[in-house]
Image (cartoon, rainbow, N blue to C red):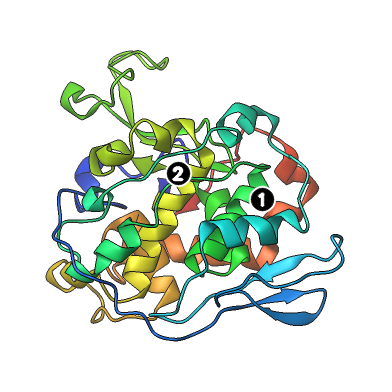
Amino acid sequence: MTALGRHRMKRADRVRIGRIGRIGMAAVVLIGVAVVGTAVVGGAIVRYGGPKAPSVAAKSKTVYFRTLPPGAKLPSGATCARLVAQSPSPENRPANKSFNATVGYPVGPGVFPPGDSKKVHALAARVNGDFTGSTEDILRWAACKWGIDQDIVFAQAAVESWWDQTQLGDWQSDAGLCAPGHGLGKDGKPGECPESFGILQNKYLYEKDGWPYISTSTAMNVDVAYGIWRSCYDGYEVWLNNQPHGKKYKAGDVWGCIGRWYAGSWYTPAANRYSALVKKYLRERIWTKPSFNKLPQPPATVG
């Protein structure tokens, strides 16, 4: 069994494109489809993907963000920030405070895998980590911005780090894979350094264009992670059919793209075990349990 979080799958056991294989990419324009997103506000359906932000009268009403179809017109980060601000959440991870108050910066396509379709360039232009708020607010902002159901985001972030932006993972002993400032032994494990950082356990090796902000900014960490999820969901990760796969890769598969984040492959046993664990946390709504407010994360296992 392979434990998640601080004790994740060893480097040699994973396809090296990993959760987020990233080395340069060519540019092309995203094919936009005129689909306007919706959110649930106090039981009512609100449009949020169009040219104007929705009007929500009562600040106490919570907007619920759902998955938008492949090719949908995605709302801007600013629109999502306004929607999240209608119903801000309290902080349940005080240790994230400084990371939550730090914004990221615009990045190029280097944070996406090199084998992605050239259409991914328009997604890369959206990544900037430009949001501050509580940990839950930041997760909701990313769900809105990238058109993925917010409860799936909550569940996946729980599997990865128990919503802890300070989380370090994928410890290994190759100095050449260490991130700047995180050399062997620098983070408390003699002869080892972490490869993965933050609330979604983003990999430095494949997201160098986002360093150091994938580590120092919670918003940047999730912005990159779900930008990559959207690329997969929109059908741009065509390289997945050249990796070991249990079925043919195609657009519009929420759970295939969740499993790919962990395994770097499509419906392989490792990917399936990971997505099953995220589904388990989703069914349990683990983030609503009293035990969720306790750190550190209990060991979550894939296997």
Q: Name the residue under label 1.
A: 137
Q: How far apart are marks 2 and 1 (CA)?
A: 14 Å
How many labels, in total?
2
- Between 125 and 246, the residue placed more toward the observer is 125
125 relative to 85 in the view: left or right:
left
Q: Residue at x 29, y 52 (%)?
A: 20
Which one is earlier in the sequence, the residue at label 2 or at label 1? 1
Position of 36 with respect to 240 (left or right) is right
Tell me if I can see residue 140 in this picture. no
Whole-percent x and y of residue 56? 79, 69
Would you identify the image quadrant in which residue 117 lies?
bottom left
Residue at 24%, 53% in the rendered image:
109
Q: For the residue labelled by badge 1, is the local secondary structure a helix, a strand or a loop?
A: helix
Please provide percent x and percent y for residue 126: 39, 57
Asked if residue 146 lies left or right of residue 43, the reply is left
The mark found on residue 220 in the picture is none
**Pointer 1 local density, CA inside 10 Å: few below 14, some 14–19, many at least 20:** many
Q: Within 10 Å of the Cα at label 2, are there few (<14), some (14-19), or many (20+) other Cα atoms?
A: many
Judged left or right of residue 108, residue 188 is right
Residue 293 position, x and y percent, is 74, 40
Q: In this view, does 101 lie above or below 52?
A: above
The quadrant of the image that shows the C terminus is: bottom left
The extreme front residue here reads 52
Three-letter code, disc 2: Asn
Q: Which residue was labeled with disc 2?
A: 221
253 over 15 or under it: above or below: below
Helix, strand or loop status at disc 2: helix
Q: Indicate the amino acid at tag 1.
A: Asp
Q: Which residue is drawn at 28% across and 81% down?
A: 250
Q: Is residue 235 visible?
A: yes
